[in-house]
Amino acid sequence: MEQRTVHGAIAGKSRPAELSTAMIVGSGKGMPQAMLSHQRMTIWNVLCCISSDFAQTSKVAWRYHAATIFQSDMIPPLTALRCFEAAARHRSYTRAADELALTQSAVSKQVAQLEALIGTRLFRRTRRGVELTPVGAAYAKKVAHRLEGLERDTMDAKAQQGGTALQLATVPTFATRWLLPRLPGLRSQRPDLTVHLETRTRPFLFADTHFDAALYAGTPEQVERWPGTQATLLMHEDVVAVASPTLAATRKRWTAHDVAAAPLLQQSTRPESWRQWFRAMDAAPPQSMAGPRYELFSMLAMAAIHGLGIALMPRMLVEAELAQGQLVVLSPMPWRSDRNYYLVSPEAARESAALGALRDWLLAEAGGG
């Protein structure tokens, strides 16, 4: 009975009115009565204070404990996620353990805990190791993306030191031939602004990436169909037919029919370019789509430099090669293609001051050539 009374008092349910101080100080034999009375009273006061404080503390502790339980249900431990991502990438617990400097059993245990938390199997065992289940495959892609983002955000936080960083997606050759040579000018104007570049050649969903904006080459219709975005036109694209000086010297004057008879170098993401160019030149060759295909303009330019054929290139992307005599323009009349260069950003997002500064700088550079 006395134990229940003490427990109730400490839990804040009642005052310890029935508490016997003999439980604390013993029977008090051999002690003066005044001293015993004073000691019992002191202990009484201490217990009353503990009872009141513990009642308040227990409420706070329970709320913290409940929040911790809730968070643990929603956010798996980072170690478990890293083990799962490595095992998913290698399709092997053993190779994942080697990469993470853990034992195979430790990786297996972490994955098992993650499966228990989610409530479903992420792997199934095979003779050659493990394979992802459909749920595991979908989850692995998302986890890998989140871990990469966390690593990137950490690097950004370490590198910024009070500055601002922008993540920019861009078509690759435009970045290397036009953007990068101009970035020192941006740095001199805005030394606090850092621009990170990654290549993307096709539209994507900004919500699924870490990008703040994208430099994109496309038609107005393609930009219009890019969901959830807004676009700023930077420049139009003027295209010229170019070849190596050796190939160009085989004729004094090149006509569209002469070009059609030569090997045509194709850009794989623009399969209709030659057909459109010949149409603009009032020619209709039967094999406008024949010839080797290259994904990037930089590949196309290099193939033309080495005499593999004639390439259609945006002039701004081969200015250096033309100036150095590595390439020659075969037709003096440029063709304005249906593609333009845009700065694309999420429509719903509130534009940052850094992105606004980048847009103003790009427009000024594009206007100046």
Image (cartoon, rainbow, N blue to C red):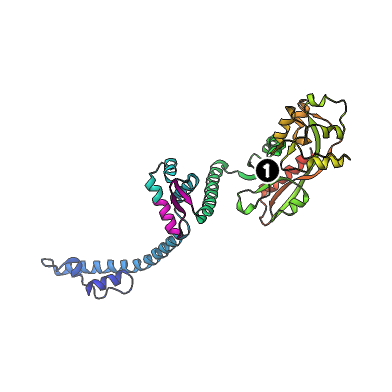
Instruction: Tell me the residue at 10%/66% (across/down).
Output: 30
**Residue 101: quadrant of the picture:** top left
Query: Quick one: quadrant of the N terminus?
Result: bottom left
Q: Residues within 10 Å of mark 1 (few under 14, many from 20)?
A: many
- Tell whether position 353 is magenta: no
Residue 349: give x, y in percent of width and height. Answer: 66, 55
- Left or right of 75? Residue 283 is right
Between 133 and 261, the one lying in front of the other is: 261
**Residue 37: quadrant of the picture:** bottom left
- Left or right of 218? Residue 118 is left
Between 29 and 90, the one lying in front of the other is: 90
User: Is 15 above or below relative to 236?
Assistant: below
Query: Quick one: quadrant of the C terminus?
Result: top right
Q: Given the image, on which type of amino acid does mark 1 rest?
A: Thr
Name the element at disc 1.
strand
The total number of labels drawn is 1
Residue 339: give x, y in percent of width and height. Answer: 78, 45
Can see residue 332?
no
Instruction: Tell me the residue at 55%/45% (across/down).
Output: 152
Q: Which residue is mark 1?
A: 170
Between 166 and 55, the one lying in front of the other is: 166
Can see residue 258?
yes
- Tell whether position 124 is magenta: yes
Magenta span: 109-132
Residue 310: give x, y in percent of width and height. Answer: 78, 32
Residue 6: give x, y in percent of width and height. Answer: 26, 71
Between 1 and 326, the one lying in front of the other is: 326
**Residue 155: quadrant of the picture:** top right
